[in-house]
Amino acid sequence: MTKKREERLRILTQTDQPLWDQGVCFAGMDEAGRGPLAGNVVAACVIMPPSPLLAWVDDSKKLSPARRDQVYDEIMATALFMGVGQADPEEIDRINILEATKNAMRRAAENAPATLFLLDALSNLGLHGEERGIIHGDALSYSIAAASIIAKVTRDRQLLALDQQYPGYGFAQHKGYGTAQHIAALKTLGPCPAHRKTFIGHFV
C-alpha cells in the first residue's frame, strides 16, 4: 500500500476505529441517485470489519468506474452485513426525493444487526438504533465510504440495464443525470417509464 493510500485510510478510519475499539456494532450508510432525472435512488447499509482494511475504499466519487467495480467486489467479499434499499421513479414522484431517499435507507438498514448507524448527512430516519449524521461522511468514515461504493455501483449497473431497455437516451453514459445529451434526447424522444416526472417537467 502506498503512503498516500495509508494516509487516506488513516483519515477515513478516524471515525470508525474508536467504535471498533469499543466493540460497537455499527453500520455505514449512504445513497446514490438523488439528483438524476431518471432511475431509482439507491441506498446501502454496510457493516465492515476492522480487518482487513481495504486499501481503495474511499468516497465513490473519487474512484474511477473500474476501481469502483473492483472495490465493490472486495467489499461484498469482506462485509459482515450488506443491505441495499431503493425507491423507484414512481415513488419519488409520489412523495418527493427526500422522503423516497429516507425510505430507501430504511429498507437498506432493515435487517442490519447494528446498534449505531453512521449516515452521510441525513438523520432522524427512525432506524432501530442510534443514528449519527456526518456531513461529508463518505469522505470521513470508512464504513460510509464503503456504503457509497455499494450504492453507486448498484445504481450504475441499473442504468446500464436501462440503456438496453430504453435505447437512445444515453443512460450508459450519463447515468440519468441532466446532461446536454440527456436533455436533447428527452426533447426528441419524450420521457420513458424510467424518468422522474417531477424532475423533467421543464425539459419536455
Image: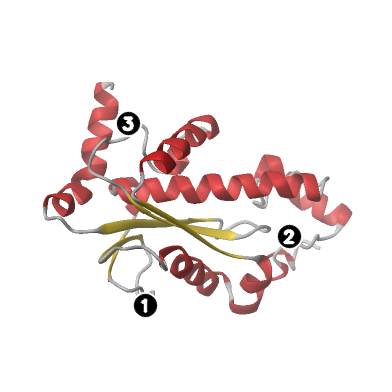
For mark 2, give the secondary structure: loop
For mark 3, give the secondary structure: loop
Going by the numbered disc 3, the residue's amino acid type is Ala
For mark 1, give the secondary structure: loop
Q: Whole-Å distance between the Cαs marked 2 and 3?
A: 35 Å
Q: Tell me the residue that label 1 is attached to.
A: 126
Q: Whole-Å distance between the Cαs marked 1 and 3?
A: 33 Å
- Please say which color scheme the image uses: secondary structure
At which x and y percent is residue 155?
58, 50
Q: Tell me the residue that label 3 is attached to.
A: 55
Q: Residue at x 28, y 26 (%)?
A: 4
Which residue is outermost to the top? 2
Q: Tell me the residue that label 2 is attached to.
A: 194
Which residue is outermost to the right? 188
Q: Earlier in the sequence, mark 1 or mark 2?
A: 1
At which x and y percent is residue 101?
51, 67
Q: Whole-Å distance between the Cαs marked 1 and 2?
A: 29 Å
Q: Earlier in the sequence, mark 1 or mark 3?
A: 3
